[in-house]
Amino acid sequence: MFLKTVFFFATLITFSTVACAESSRDELASTVAERSMVILTDVLSQIGARPAGSQQEKNTVELIASTWQQANLTNIEQQSFSATVRGKDIDSQNIWVTLPGTSDKHIVIGAHYDSTGVKAGSEGATDNGVALALVTALAEQLPAYKLNATVTFVLFGAEEVGLQGAKAFVAERVKTGQLPEPDSMINLDTIAGGDKLYIHSPTQTAYKSCVTASTYNASPEIRHELLKLAGDQGLPFNLHPSFPGYPEGETAGWSDHAPFACTGIPIAYIEATNFAINGKDGFDGYSQSLHPELWDCLDAPQQTACDRDAEKRWGRIWHTGNDRLATLETLHPGRLQAQLSAVSKLLVYYLTGNGLTGDKNL
């Protein structure tokens, strides 16, 4: 009887500890999501669209740096770089902060902060304002918590004109050893706004942008880890279905994960879109939503345009006048916040899991 009683109380204590840890992580994830919305609103109201190489892009770096400085982060680093885009020279910057963890593992979590489509009326809310806000908020909120790995939170400039920031970061910081070699990289690009949340890994065939195909890393390991965690927590993340050129769950090299995969670092890529839509170029995810107001004429049962030759809008949000916070809230009330909360919870659990409590280091 005594042993049964001891076992009962030991089990109760273990259950209570786990429940307390999960509650702590849930509270942290909620705080991160709330702060992300504040930061996003500040970026859009104070700066707006952020074309690569523009003053608005520079102002965004200053806002990120100011946010981190107010959080007493002292190891903020910046990297200036230049690039030639369509015959024009531009200057841009990357900005990052590294938080120490309890193991030798090193994770890079990155997002680009520039935007495009300003002439079409885009303010870059989903592409990539939500992700830049989340990365900023994670770095702001996590220093007081135990992390299971050292984490570098980086914001890349000039992604929309050829992944220039990520390329410069990998070439001048990762490959040179100035930054501890990452064990993995998680790319956040357009993580809210589309109909569904996805987690991708690279294609098995090396990206054409890779200088050396022999160093390319196509491992789906990080994707598997994140999807398992999402399933355990009841979070609505998906694998995209297979379509020509892209097997299930694999993505092309069109975002900041590509330079990392090319140099041999396992990656995962989180985004919100809708791969079930037969868009302008097929099932490629470039049509983000089936909302009828985003189409000239939607054939909802077939999830495509009524007239493929006449369609102009194709359910697109990115790079269009639909990528505005007010527009998105009108089309899908609460969706952006819900998806942001899901990504926030996924990353908070991923970074404070593996048996750690997630409690503050008091």
Image (cartoon, grey):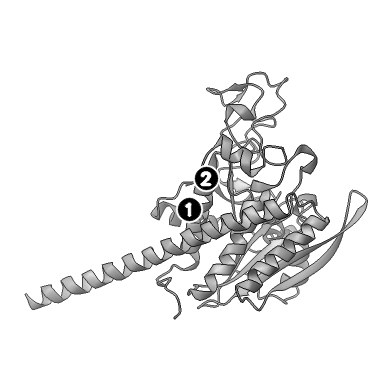
Q: Indicate the quadrant where residue 317 lies.
A: top right
Farthest residue, direction bottom: 362
Q: Is residue 91 left or right of residue 11?
A: right
Q: Seen in the image, is 243 located left or right of residue 54?
A: left
Q: Quadrant of residue 93?
A: bottom right
Residue 227, disc: 1
Relative to 95, residue 225 above or below: above
Does the rendering let one see residue 219? no
User: Which of the image's four quarters has the C terminus?
Assistant: bottom left
- Foreground pick, 41 / 296: 41
Q: Position of residue 324 (x, y in %)?
A: 66, 42
Quadrant in which the N terminus is drawn: bottom left
Is 115 situated left or right of 283 in this image?
right
| Amino acid beneath label 1 | Leu
**Considering only vertical position in the picture, is 168 above or below 202?**
below
Disc 2 marks which residue?
Answer: 239
Q: Is residue 157 above or below residue 150?
A: above
Residue type beneath disc 2: Leu
List x then y, in percent, for residue 137: 58, 63
Q: Determine whether the residue tagged by mark 2 lies in a helix, strand or loop.
A: loop
| Residue neighbourhood size for the residue with mark 1, other residues' Cα within 10 Å, grouped as few (<14), some (14–19), many (≥20) | many
Residue furthest to the right in view is 87
Residue occupying the point 64% across, 21% down: 297
Q: Position of residue 181 (x, y in %)?
A: 65, 73
User: In terms of secondary structure, where does tag 1 sit?
Assistant: helix
The answer to whether residue 36 of the structure is visible from this angle is yes
Front residue (pair 326, 100): 326
**Residue lying at 76% horizontally and 60% vertically, measured from the top left:** 59
Q: Residue at x 42, y 73 (%)?
A: 359
Q: Are marks 1 and 2 in contact (CB under 8 Å)?
A: yes
